[in-house]
Amino acid sequence: MVLDPIAPADITTEKRYRERWSWDKVLWASHCIDCYPGNCQLRVYLKDGKVVREESAGTFQTIQEGVPDMNPMGCQKGVGWSRMLDSEERLLYPLKRDGERGSGRWKRITWDEAATEIADAIIDAVQEVGPESVMAPSGCNLGTWGAVGRGQFMRILGGLTTDLNAEMNDFSPGHYLTWGTFDPVSSIDDWFLSEMVFIWFQNPFYTRIPHIHYALEARYNGAEVVTVAPDASPSSIHSDYYVPVKVGSDAAFALGMAHVVIEEGLVNEKFVSEQTDLPLLVNPKTKRYLRQSEMEEGGAEDQFYAWDSKTNQPVLAPKGTLFWGEVTPALEGQWNIQTRAGSVQVTTVFAMMRARLKDYTPEKASEHCGVHPETIRTLARKIASKKTNFLCCLNNAGKHYHGDLIERSQILLLSLTGNWGRQGTGLRAWLSGLMDGWFTVLAKSKRGPEEISSILDMMEQMVGFIQSQDPTLTRTQLAIMQAKMPGQGQGTGFVPPVFWWYHHAGYKDAWRNRAWHDPSMAREFDDYFNEAVSKGWWQGFDLPRPEHPTRVIIESGGNFIRRTRGGGKMLLKHLFPGLKMVATLDVRMSGTAMYSDIVLPIAHQYEKLGFGIPSTHTMNLTFSDKAVDPPGEALNEWEAFGILAKKLEERAKARGVEPYKNALGGEHDIREAHSRYTANGLWTDTEAMFDEMIRDSALIGTLPPDASLEELRRKGYFRFQGLGISARAIAQATDPKPDETFVPFRNHVEKGEPYPTLSRRAQFLIEHEWFIEADEHLPRHKDSPAQGGNYPFQLTSGHNRWSIHSLNIANHVMQETHRGAPHMVMNNGDAERMGIADNEMVRVFNDMGEFQVAVKTSPSAAPGQVIVYNGFDAYQFPNWATANDAEPGMIKWLHLAGGYGHLQYWSTEWQPCAVMRGTRVGVQKLS
Amino acid sequence: MAKKAAPSKRQLAMVFDLNKCLGCQTCTLACKTAWTTRAGMEHQWWNIVNTFPGRGTPRDVFSHGGGYTKKGEPIPGDFPSKRLWGEAWDFDYEGVFGSNRDEPIPLHPREHDGAAPQWGPNWDEDMGGGEYPNSYFFYLQQICMNCSEPACVEACPRESVYKREEDGIVLIDEERCHGYRFCAEACPYKRIYFNEQRNIAQKCISCFPRLEAGVAPACIRQCPGRVRHIDYLDNADGHIYKLVKKWKVALPLRPDFGVEPNVYYIPPTSPLAFKENGEFDDTGSRIPMDYLKEMFGPGVEQALATLEAEREKAAAGKKSELMDILISRNWNDLLGPFTVDPAQLQRQPVR
């Protein structure tokens, strides 16, 4: 055989590949719908007006000298996003159901026809029931336009929107009980400065792909990494210590460590005295603080005491500062104090807690949590001597029935060791805020700085007035007070969904089952539920009521049939039969879309302007440009809700709909729906609106003074400069610095700024009568109740690796990076014992429901544990029944408590959430 | 058989740090969107990350032969069947979303003949080895190793596979290739795919068009774990030289294959194992040392000891060049000479 000579330099293959790597336009991109905390900066490359691919930009600057930069941020979903723009699950045209719900029989209709049907259904519902019968379940893929579009639309017609945090159950009740907010968040680069990194209630190797390198780089910098989880999660493989706790027993583990810290004399007494309620005086009999009202006539109910060891007498705990000045508060002791009612023996909260910790010696704690006592001792000593960070983006403990106890125990441990409010320390949840202009634009009647200035002036005046009445109030407390006012909460108008679930979605049956609750729930669930409502603990918003059955569902930004604990089947059985209209707006055919009456196509990322959800995780506002027009008839959400508003106005006029009131008395005139939606034509152009949002935020001080859309197009992102005006952001209680990692609560630690709690300190004693009745006035461990019935396996979960929620899950490219179908991880020994082979289908069941799924066997799962990562859509399972179908979605009755100090609802904060971790299930071979 | 490849003037090399890999497949998708979306390439994953111990891609990846004996003789290999690679599965979107049907059907993957898949490119993700709670695994990134003794080059009777003189990158001339797949049989890492539609072999091209423009390969430049270092092996000031030659912590994969690969790996550490009574066992490795030696050669024990010693130095507040390299506070330092931002380039398509 004679071959031609090879001349590599000229070879056509090389030329061809060189030519393939070409483009004619490059724009900024990020993935702002559904991804949190995300804020990755990418660039999208276009050829001939089409997106060909995207690439991580790598343009972030170093913030703090010696700390790694944030480049490159991205993940497999992000760098493969372009695969979704024209994929099979994409929605292109408005569709109307042409058969039973869920039958998959559709006909294509026009936007006008779709809007007419939706508008008429809304008007029917308003006229027959009231505006509260129109419900928007919150979801997290709202993005820039969904949040304002849906919010504006629902506000105009007076419908209800469920609180995002309860819908997702991303709330951390134990944080809220202790700190008065659930959401302290440090920046990702701060993880690098830790000496001990705990990965606990988190699987960042799945969920924090762009960020987790900081923990591994901290490790190379000398830090030790600990993963605490029942299963050897993918996050444990790069740890120094993997601590396998029994499912839901983490409070015992934390309290065992707290015991060691105290008994070995390792307590950071200064921190504990200043930051917490542990030095406050308490009556051990009543389990209530000693109050000024007990000591003197007319004394305050919220004025508490400590014991000054120098002068040997009780002293008032200052309300305006955490610092004690000349006083040296005793942490322990017993004293007889003369009150108005006679002599009372008091002690400190610390002493009460220490006595309680006698039940959590390492040996006793080990019996609950399964961790060896020596491990508890070793790790406790390390935490006490090192800058320790409990690394989370949201503390997933809240997904456990007793998650509040777990979180309170974790915080106790951190406080004893002085581990928050300085670099390299803390515990975190999630946070939005910082981009105030996102919502201020909706309050404006014209463009420009004028109205923002007057809003800011008004707020300053109000702050001045209230502080003149009570100078001890902090800005955080004032912002929260404002957020608690009716209809507030960053313009979200949320209502806690617990009441909706109870009255209209069938949950009361599960919640009334006392066997699925903790045995310390002394009375029937309904007794507590009714007491909470009748005592007015849940006033101040348009509470979902039994007399307002839901008639219309507007699903935009979520996939609530997939997501809702308790399962789609529960909603389909109890809620859907009464619904006259289910309208879903989405980029793709979701499980919820499949059961909808009308489905509306929404513009995807790269097809509309957007910014990443603003938070202190990255401290950046990251820009995503509109690179191409949406395909088919897809529209961005602002335009979509604008069409609905216009049609609502048109139909209301035609049908002579008079102005009406909601149950709180708020008036709504939907004959002006569209003019109100656009603020009389001010907001029709999303470019202008976007620019105004940025400029407003600059005026408010969260973005640089010269910030504009034009400037953002140049730079791609802005670093936040201030916290702005939202209560959640202000509650971070730290002034951001341009050249430092961000750590919340520095003002508490460095400046003595009080916390927004009843005691104005990190509060471990919760005196609410229900908490005392349940013996949960202080942190403790309780076993998880047998939710779902008495079955041998405990079902756990977590976000999956391959999709942001369910957004990417049905995409064929992403599916090839796993088994392409839902799976349940099961311990290999358990599977073998039951004769179940890898990839074999099983039936998983309990008294609540059942589903079928393929098993994936692994020695990483604990015996007795089964894991189904969430995000798989219903239609990926046989019979479209998901793991949620076996989860009763229990709520803990104590979380209905109110009427006590800081225990009051405000947007995304104190409220019951449906839990699911540790649900009991049986597993059976299908064949 | 063709001639053996001549040594290149310079050799491009990479180091992948297994202690930072998240198994997230961002590299995999970065590569997919860059190169392998075209017809006939849907099933190709030039870059893939698999869980080890595991069976890999294609299934039982290191059991299909290829490479050289110690004496330098080619070891016969096979070309795994389509099922072992994993097909680009079919999903019946239309049937699930839109057809007339009485019972809901699930959206499940199907091979092209309608069968349920039994393997795919990441089938045994996160399964690993050992027994609870002493289970273990690590993620292993697999791309073309641009070997210094590339068995694929020698195996091609048409001399379609060649090693570039200027940078040592191994490429397939798709114009010459007749789709015999001898190269794929000879590759012991099984990193060469077959394009049925065009009847040619295709594989990772090390993003050479990017390298020529000073831009790091797509997988390297987008790795959010900051796992991947790239440079010329002969740059004594560069990360690769320091990690491979100076600190000797970066090791070749399966050195017994005899092909002198130019991708090196920082071997995996693992959490302390447990004794029978539940206490930490600080003797020995959770991942069995024999397995690590099989994968990374006899140098692995010393490499792990060096890593541990340098980490302790850092913990004590002392400077460690090795830890500083592995941290790479400035991301660009990972990229060697390939730090150009591609968005700054003009690369108008040829019309």
Image: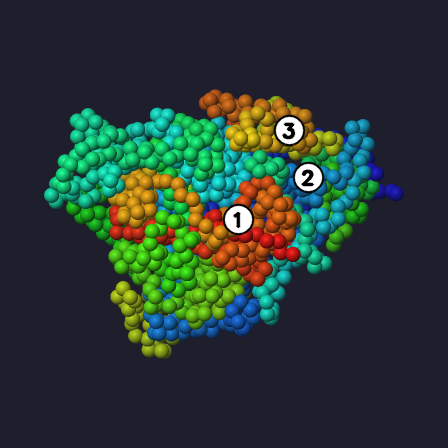
In this orientation, which residue lies closer to the viewer: B220 or A764?
A764
Residue at 48 percent across and 34 percent down: it is A371
Have a look at marks 1 and 3 and say if they share a chain.
Answer: no
Look at the numbered disc 3 and give the secondary structure of its residue: helix
Residue carrying label 2? B144
Instruction: Locate the N terminus of chain A by quadrant.
Output: top right
Whether residue A389 is visible here, answered yes or no, is: no
Q: Which mark is residue B15?
A: none
Q: Residue at x 48, y 43 (%)?
A: A247
- Subunit under mark 2: B
Describe residue A709's horizontal placement relative to residue A754 as left or right: right
Is residue B328 toward the left or the right of residue B156 in the image? left
Which residue position is annotated with label 3?
B289
Which element is circle 1 on?
A: loop
Residue type pointed to by label 2: Cys
Which residue position holds label 1? A792
Kind of residue at disc 3 = Met
Residue B141: x %, y % from top left = 63, 39
Question: Around disc 2, counting alpha carbons within 10 Å, would you say few (fewer than 14), some (14 to 19), or many (20 or more)?
Answer: many
When the figure is inspected, residue A316 is found, relative to residue B42, above or below; the finding is: above
Secondary structure category for the residue under label 2: loop
Name the one closer to the observer, A98 or A258: A258
